[in-house]
Image (spheres, rainbow, N blue to C red):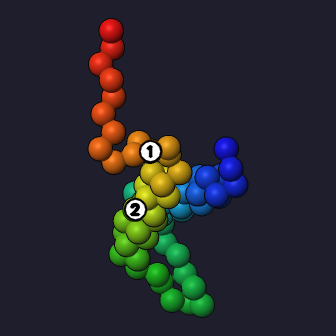
């Protein structure tokens, strides 16, 4: 395994953790206050979608792939 594959998997795992954290905030409806202002829940919904998509994309990129047009030989 080479370092670009490891980097893709680590980044994918971090985006996956971010996605789970934001999803947990949505499900538990946790309040966040920044400098006296309440942060609404909708940014967490957006973060779930974006972090989840990035997680899926990076982990998919790190998997080995077959060349285009490759057909497996039938088992004999």
The quarter of the picture where residue 71 lies is top left
Q: Is residue 31 above or below residue 75?
A: below
Q: Can you say which quadrant of the picture contains the C terminus?
A: top left
The quarter of the picture where residue 56 lies is bottom left
Q: Is residue 67 above or below residue 19?
A: above
Q: Is residue 66 above or below residue 19?
A: above
Q: Characterize the local packing of mark 1: few (<14), some (14-19) or many (20 or more) Cα atoms within 10 angstroms.
A: few
Query: Does the image show residue 14?
Result: no
Instruction: Pinpoint residue 55: horizontal percent, then vertical percent.
Output: 48, 58
Tag of residue 53:
2
Q: Is residue 14 above or below residue 64?
A: below
- Give the residue drawn at x 64%, y 58%: 4
Give the mark nearer the N terminus: 1 vs 2.
Answer: 2
Q: Can you say which quadrant of the picture contains the N terminus?
A: top right
The answer to which of 14 and 3 lies nearer the viewer is 3
Instruction: Pinpoint residue 29: horizontal percent, then vertical percent.
Output: 42, 64
Tag of residue 56:
none
The answer to which of 70 and 64 lies nearer the viewer is 70
Tags 1 and 2 touching, CB below 8 Å: no
Tell me the mark number nearer the camera, choosing from 1 and 2: 1
- Give the residue drawn at x 54%, y 57%: 12
Instruction: Pinpoint residue 48: horizontal percent, then vertical percent.
Output: 41, 64
Gap between marks 1 and 2 measured at Cα: 19 Å
Element at label 2 = helix
- Give the residue drawn at x 33%, y 14%: 75
């Amino acid at each position: 395994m080479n370092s670009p594959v490891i980097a893709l998997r680590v980044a994918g795992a971090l985006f996956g953790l971010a996605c789970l954290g934001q999803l947990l905030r949505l499900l538990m409806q946790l309040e966040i206050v920044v400098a006296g202002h309440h942060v609404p829940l909708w940014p967490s919904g957006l973060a779930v979608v974006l972090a989840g998509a990035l997680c899926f994309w990076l982990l998919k990129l790190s998997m080995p792939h077959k060349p285009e047009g490759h057909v497996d030989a039938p088992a004999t």
